[in-house]
Image: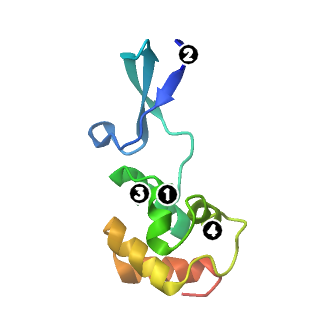
Amino acid sequence: MTADRAVAIEGCDMANGPDLTSVAEIVDGRVINVRHVPRQHRYDPTTLAGAIKLRAWDCGIPLTRLAPLVGMKPDSLRQRLSKTRGKRALQPWQVTKLAIALGLEVAALHRLAAKHEGWKV
């Protein structure tokens, strides 16, 4: 690791609000400066991808760790939730498992999944 490179720390900084993330500057293996910066991407909690990504971010769980829970390769969940994926992003059992793992309301997440697939709910 180079001396002047900032490294993003995984996790949620709820004390300073949900829209901030911590960035630490590490020099010679020691943290010398920690600052809180706004996240670069804002997710809409009224969409399937936004609800899952925001809740996972709040819990400090990367999507790559959630993917095996629903039988996917580490990067597949992010791809399935992308806007270009379109219909049939996730199977109903996968939506249920994600809702339980993230502590979200199962019925609400299923409604978001139906909207994601183009259903009028």
Mark sitting earlier along the chain (2/3): 2
Label 3 sits on residue: 56
- Distance of mark 3 from mark 1, alpha carbons? 7 Å
Disc 2 crowd rating (10 Å Cα; few below 14, some 14-19, many 20+) is few
- Distance of mark 3 from mark 4, alpha carbons? 15 Å
Mark sitting earlier along the chain (3/4): 3
- Distance of mark 1 from mark 4, alpha carbons? 11 Å
Residue 47 in sight? no
Mark sitting earlier along the chain (2/4): 2
Label 1 sits on residue: 63
Dot 2 falls on a residue whose secondary structure is loop
Label 4 sits on residue: 80
Dot 1 falls on a residue whose secondary structure is helix
**Which amino acid, by three-letter code, is at mark 4?**
Arg
Residue 38, percent across and down? 48, 35
Mark sitting earlier along the chain (1/4): 1
- Distance of mark 2 from mark 3, alpha carbons? 29 Å
Q: In front: mark 2 or mark 3?
A: 2
Q: Are marks 2 and 1 in contact (CB under 8 Å)?
A: no
**Which amino acid, by three-letter code, is at mark 3?**
Ala
Label 2 sits on residue: 2
